[in-house]
Amino acid sequence: MNQTPLHAAAAGNDVETISKLLAEGATIDARDGTGATPLLVATHGNKVAAAKALIDAGADVNAKDNIQDSPYLYAGARGHLEILKMTLSHGADLESINRYGGTALIPASERGHVETVRTLIEAGVDVDHVNKLGWTALLEAIILGDGGKSHQQIVGLLIEAGADVNLGDREGVSPLRHARSHGYREIEKLLAAAGAR
């Protein structure tokens, strides 16, 4: 794994050891075998105290690993809200994209993380960003979501934030048509009310 003691301390949420190692001159953004920094390791495990200690000490919230995940992108995708908010207040790059060419908002929408979606929208992430699959956050919330309450709320938030309700996928299939083909009546209603065709 090529882990440093700082990576191990981050994984263990051990703030005391993190502070000690940094005071002794440990490299804050050292990489392990996967290219992950200690902060990304803390983010993987949703270790909030460790993440805070590292961010406060100046860890790079945008440092990407070998599969293009950064602490900011990963926290957004997984709905690790406290860490996400810390990355946002410490220079998260809202335009940075993951290996699928998507912003943090897209996987957050797909996975049904309502508060994360709200937080990312408020931070100013582009709601109409299109990833490598040709999908926006709105399309992913419908196509990969389950049509349930959280995905209905997310569709509502995206519409409120000005998402283009008629921006279709690569084949030109609109969000409304996807919602209809999945039988997601509530989402269909939300889209129709917003002028979706």
Image (tube, rainbow, N blue to C red):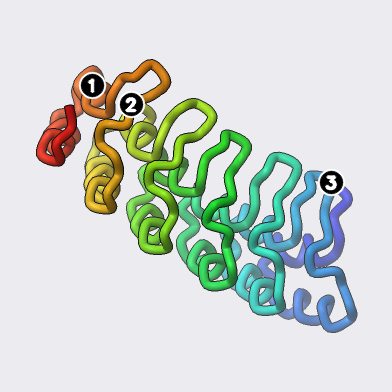
Tell me the distance, in whole angstroms, between the alpha carbons under discs 2 and 1: 9 Å
- So how many labels did they put on this image? 3
Q: Nearer the viewer, mark 3 or mark 2?
A: 2
Decide if residue 24 is on the left or right side of residue 144. Answer: right
Q: Nearer the viewer, mark 2 or mark 1?
A: 2
Q: Amino acid at mark 1?
A: Arg
User: Residue placed at 59% from the left, 50% from the top?
Assistant: 96
Nearer the N terminus, badge 3 or badge 1?
A: 3
| Quadrant of the frame with the C terminus | top left
User: Residue placed at 46% from the left, 53% from the top?
Assistant: 79
Nearer the N terminus, badge 2 or badge 1?
A: 2
Q: Is residue 132 above or below residue 57?
A: above
Camera-side residue: 11 or 142?
Answer: 142
User: Residue placed at 73% from the left, 47% from the top?
Assistant: 65
Name the element at disc 3: loop
Kindly check if marks 3 and 2 are in contact, taking CB atoms under 8 A apart as contact. no
Kindly check if marks 2 and 1 are in contact, taking CB atoms under 8 A apart as contact. yes
Q: Position of residue 6 (x, y in %)?
A: 80, 66
Q: For residue 188, which quarter of the picture? A: top left
Q: Which residue is mark 2?
A: 168
Label disc, if present, on residue 33 of the rendered structure: 3
User: Residue placed at 30% from the left, 44% from the top?
Assistant: 163
Q: Which residue is mark 1?
A: 177
Q: Position of residue 157 (x, y in %)?
A: 26, 51
Name the element at disc 1: helix
Q: Amino acid at mark 3?
A: Gly
Name the element at disc 2: loop
Q: Amino acid at mark 2?
A: Gly
Tell me the distance, in whole angstroms, between the alpha carbons under discs 3 and 1: 44 Å
Decide if residue 43 is on the left or right side of residue 122. Answer: right
Estimate how packed mark 1 is, as few (under 14), some (14 to 19) or many (20 or more) residues with alpha carbons within 10 Å: some
